Amino acid sequence: MSVTVFIRYQLDPFKRAQFEEYSRRWLTIIPKCGGDLIGYFMPHEGTNNIAFALISFESLAAYEAYRARLRQDAEGMANFHFAEDHKFILAEERTFLRQVVL
């Protein structure tokens, strides 16, 4: 069974440009580490401090292996540090979803 990780970010609305830079970096890092990146989604109209990401994996075990590879990846760690240093992410929630099929 495949699983999709739905990530909801609460952003500092005055630092959206930094979050977008952070997101763009993941566009190459996530696939390199084994995630099937569906995308990052930025606020456009309405609420200006909520963003989302969707990443799919073959299984929860594949997700755990991906997380381990991500922690060993120099670019991935640099991006985590970028977020910590600039504090544009105020909160992050992860939900693990499965697709409904017939």
Image (cartoon, helix red, strand yellow):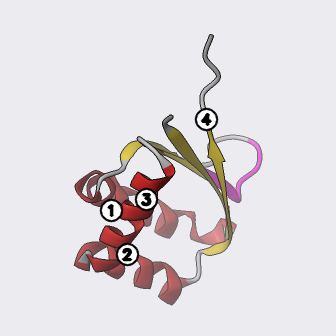
Above/below status of 25 relative to 44: below
* Amino acid type assigned to the residue bearing label 4 in the image: Arg
Q: Which of pointers 4 and 3 lies earlier in the amino acid sequence?
A: 3
Residue 8: % across, % down:
66, 55
Residue 85: % across, % down:
49, 89
Label 4, on which residue? 98
Give the structural element (helix, strand or loop) at label 2: helix
Range of residues picked out in magenta: 46-51
Q: Is residue 41 left or right of residue 14?
A: left
Numbered tag placed on residue 79 in the rendering: 2
* Amino acid type assigned to the residue bearing label 1 in the image: Arg
Numbered tag placed on residue 25 in the rendering: 1
Say which of 26 and 24 sits in front.
Answer: 26
Say which of 100 and 9 sits in front.
Answer: 100
Label 3, on which residue? 23
**Count of numbered circles in the view:** 4
Give the structural element (helix, strand or loop) at label 1: helix
Q: Residue, x 33% and y 62% (percent of image)?
A: 25
